Amino acid sequence: MNDATLQRNGMFAPESQPGAAARGEESILRHYLGVLMRRKWLIFGSTVAVLLVGLMLTLMMTPKYTASTTIEIQRDSNKVTGVEGVERETAPTDMEFYQTQYGLLRSQALAQAVATELRLYDDAAFFEMFGSAEGMAWFENNRIRANAPPRAYRVRKAGEILSANIAVSPVRLSRLVNVSFTSPNPEFSARVANAWSRNFIETTLARRVEATSYARRFLEGRLNQLRQRLEGSERALVGYAQRENIVNLPSTRSTGGGNVETTERSIVADDLAVMNLELGKAKADRITAQSRLNTGAATSETLTNEAINGLRRRRAELSSDYASLMVRFEPEYPAAVAMRQQIAQLDEAIGREEGRVRSVLRGTYDATTAREAGLSERVEQAKAEVLDLRRRSIQYNIYQREVDTNRELYNTVLQRYREIGVAGGVGVNNISVVDQASIPERPSSPRLLVNLLLSLIAGTALGFGLAFVREQIDDSISDPADVQDALAVPMLGTIPKSKEGDLVLALGDRKADVSEAYLAVQTNLAFSTPQGVPRSMTVTSTVPGEGKSTTAFALASSLARGGHKVLLVDGDMRSPSMHHLLHLENKRGLSNFLAGEDNVGSLCQSIEGSNLSIMAAGPPPPSAAELLSSDRLDRLMPALRERFDYVIVDAPPVMGLADAPLLAAHVEGVVFVMESHATKITPARVAIGRLRSAHANIIGVVLTKFESKRASHGYGYSYGYGDKREAA
């Protein structure tokens, strides 16, 4: 018993078997391979058609030549002056700079500059070369028409043509850029490519100069404004200082690193500082004089006085002589009296000198005290003047800060103006040409091999697409493996498409492919029920012409050759065909029995030399459905099964008629016939649904007129074995 039958009888489910996922993937792969095999001629035809179209288009295309020039774009221009220009310096990771340069290389402004330099706007051959109908209409005998658009419009159109044929290709991981131009003329391509790089360099340099010129003009105006502001603030400062009698002297101080800062200092503050210093000295002198006066400094002064010391030495000598004289003489001795008088005179002289010294110390002390008092009074006055100056200097400092600010701004802008002037005058560009464009020797397009390869790929892709679209649109059964999935009905067998005209003769040849195929169907029928081949069967189809009558006759003949008594009933009373197939009369048959005749044996025609009998359809009744709905059909089938081993009914198609469901309800099983590659799945589902609604037992499907070449790849539906045996 095959898997389809077992699945229908519920003996196992494929999902529960080991390797179900692998079989699912294999089924999907087999489905796609089947689509490719069934539609291989469509794919082949599409591929060949696109390939031929590509070949013809390639041969018809005008050869084009591409000339390329290589330029180098550096991030920074070379530093010649050591000062900065107006443009911002780019960082090492600033890739936006290069993207901007690539955009500038593709700009319309650059294209129009090239068109202007080469005078393409007045060149009729240029517009004709690129097939511009609008441009060619501007010329007559290679001269501009009177009604032609203005020059600016022609330049713009020429620039658009150039932009459409230019290609900018940065070299990866480098600063190099390839600029390529393509045209039908090799010399013209080289001219445009070189002009493109040259104009790019010139426009870049001009843009830098223009930016510098604009900055210089701006800074000049700013300098004039700052100069006026500085002069005004200086006038305000001087006027206020004059009104308030503020006099400051310039001074310098070191700020470190060899820098010197110039500041201003007030005279009043200097005076206060000087007088404060003198007051300190006066206080020190006064303290010293007072200390010498009050602490016995007079004695020490007398000790160091030369005159007093001389007198004292003289007195000491006289005192020594007087003492020596007193040893020998009396005090009244004239010489002794004279010495005493001299000593007294010396004592008076010493006293007078000591008094003079004390008088000097007192005078010194009085002088220092008076000086200290005078300086103290002057310092207090100076302090008052400084405080008053500070009060008056608040507004002065405001004016001074404004002057300093304006001067700093002016100096900064002036320095920047000088730097820009120097940098702008150098004219160093960061773009240079590495390789000039040379005249190409061979065309860059069309490339025959590349175009053929692309056409082959496109044709194959189109073929695959058409194949899968056709497969989605085609609702017919082309692969026997799809029957179970599409209709949920077991597959009984496939019948190959016969090349012979008379199928009856082909079925009589047991070695024929058709005969072998129907024998396989009979074998599968033997496994469809536990009792073997159903004793009564109805053979029907969705629509006429699918081979149901041939299938009914083939099954009946195959069973008859097995030694069984078989009756083939033509149940299609509307359009009978069995008597034509077997060249019999159709005067009496099924319609007669259903109309009331009870002699079944007289209605059956035996085929000579076989166990096969035929019951024709009989005369066409007014309403076949009414006859089949009567109880006569219930009595017919038991009567036929008593006389024959197998009863096979060739029923009408299911769609549009009620005959087939009525006949199917009175037999043990239904064999559903489908024409491969023709019968649509949706109508077949509807037909099977109607049979099931009549409680018919659908045994399986027989796929007729099958062509193995149109089935899935590797399915194996081939009937060449019989041919080989016959040849042997």
Image (tube, grey):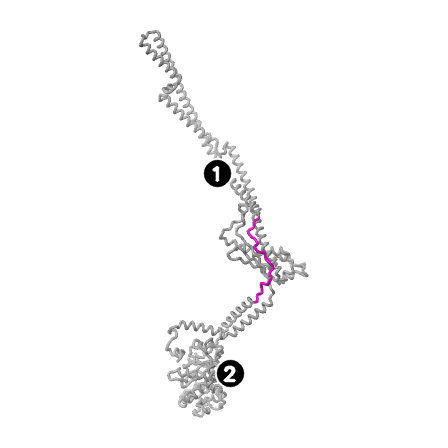
The main secondary structure of the magenta stretch is: loop
Residue 195 as seen in the image, left or right of residue 497: right
Residue 110 as seen in the image, left or right of residue 381: right
In this rendering, the count of numbered labels is 2
Residue 394, image x, y percentages = 47, 36
Q: Residue at x 60, y 55 (%)?
A: 113
- The reply to whether dot 1 and dot 2 touch (C-beta < 8 Å) is no
Residue 395, image x, y percentages = 48, 36
Residue 84, image x, y percentages = 53, 46
Residue 499: mark: 2
**Res. 651 in view:** no
Helix, strand or loop for disc 1: loop
Residue 463, image x, y percentages = 52, 71
Q: Residue at x 55, y 72 (%)?
A: 48
Q: In which image quadrant can residue 46 be found?
A: bottom right
**Gap between marks 1 and 2, in whole Å?**
115 Å
Residue 169 as seen in the image, left or right of residue 510: right
Kind of residue sitting beneath label 2 = Lys
Helix, strand or loop for disc 2: loop
- In front: 21, or 274? 21
**Res. 96 in view:** yes
Q: Quadrant of the N terminus?
A: bottom left
Label 1: how many residues lie within 10 Å, few (<14), some (14-19) or many (20+)? few
- In front: 652, or 23? 23
Vertical comparison of 722 with 209: above or below: below
Residue 432 part of the magenta-drawn span:
yes
Q: What residue is pinned by disc 1?
A: 258
Vertical comparison of 107 with 272: above or below: below
Observer-side mark, 1 or 2, equals 1
Read off the magenta span: 427-448
